[in-house]
Image (tube, helix red, strand yellow):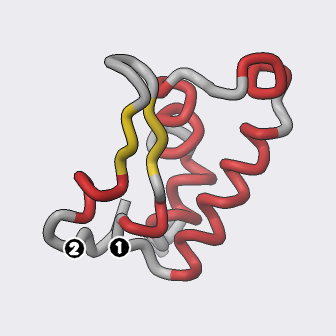
Amino acid sequence: MGANLPKGGFDSSLVFYDSTNFTINLNKLGFSESQLSALNVVCDSIKNSKEYKKNQFIDLSRFLILTLYSPYNYYKISGAEQSYN
C-alpha cells in the first residue's frame, strides 16, 4: 500500500500470542505520517465495531477488506490518485 518497508520491519512488527492470534505494529512497517493517519481512521472504526468490542480482535480478512479492498481507504492509505485525471 505504498509503505517503504525497512529490512526486518515486517518481522519486528508482528507479535504472536499463539498460532492464530497476533498484533501488527503499523508504525514499524514504513508508512508515512499521512498513511498512518489514514490507517488510524480504519483502526479506530474497527475498535468501535461490535465485533471488536465483544472479542477484542477482528479477523484478518476484515482488516484486508477495509484497507486493500476498499477503494476509498486504499487511495487514502496508498496516496494514489482517485481518478486517472
Q: Is residue 37 above or below residue 73?
A: below
Q: Nearer the viewer, residue 24 or 46?
A: 24
Q: Which residue is nearer to you in this view: 39 or 76?
A: 39
What amino acid type is highlighted by mark number 1? Gly
Tell which residue pokes out farthest to the bottom in this image. 33
Which residue bears the numbered disc 1? 30
CB-based contact (under 8 Å), mark 2 and mark 1: yes
Q: Which residue is at a point 44% across and 33% down the rendered structure image?
A: 22
The residue identified by callout 2 is 6
Indicate whether 66 appears above or below 28: above
* Residue shown at 29% from the left, 58% from the top: 12
Residue 47 percent coordinates (x, y):
77, 39
Give the SS element for disc 2: loop
Place of residue 7 in the rendered image (x, y in percent of width and height, measured from the top left): 14, 70
How far, Cα to Cα, is label 2 from label 1? 6 Å
Which amino acid type is marked by label 2? Pro
**Residue 63, image x, y percentages:** 54, 35
- Is residue 72 shown left or right of residue 64? right
Question: 64 or 57, which lies in front?
Answer: 57
Q: Which quadrant of the figure contains the N terminus?
A: bottom left
Q: Taking 55 as reference, is 32 left or right? A: left
Q: Decide which of tag 2 and tag 1 comes sooner along the chain.
A: 2
Query: Which of the labelled discs sits on residue 41, or is there none?
Result: none
Q: Give the side of residue 44 with respect to residue 66, left or right.
A: right
Q: Relative to residue 40, is residue 77 drawn left or right?
A: left
Within 10 angstroms of label 2, few (less than 14), some, or many (20 or more) residues? Answer: few
Q: Residue at x 25, y 69 (%)?
A: 5
The x and y percentages for residue 27 are: 47, 68
Specify the farthest residue to the left. 7
Instruction: Identify the element where label 1 is drawn.
Output: loop
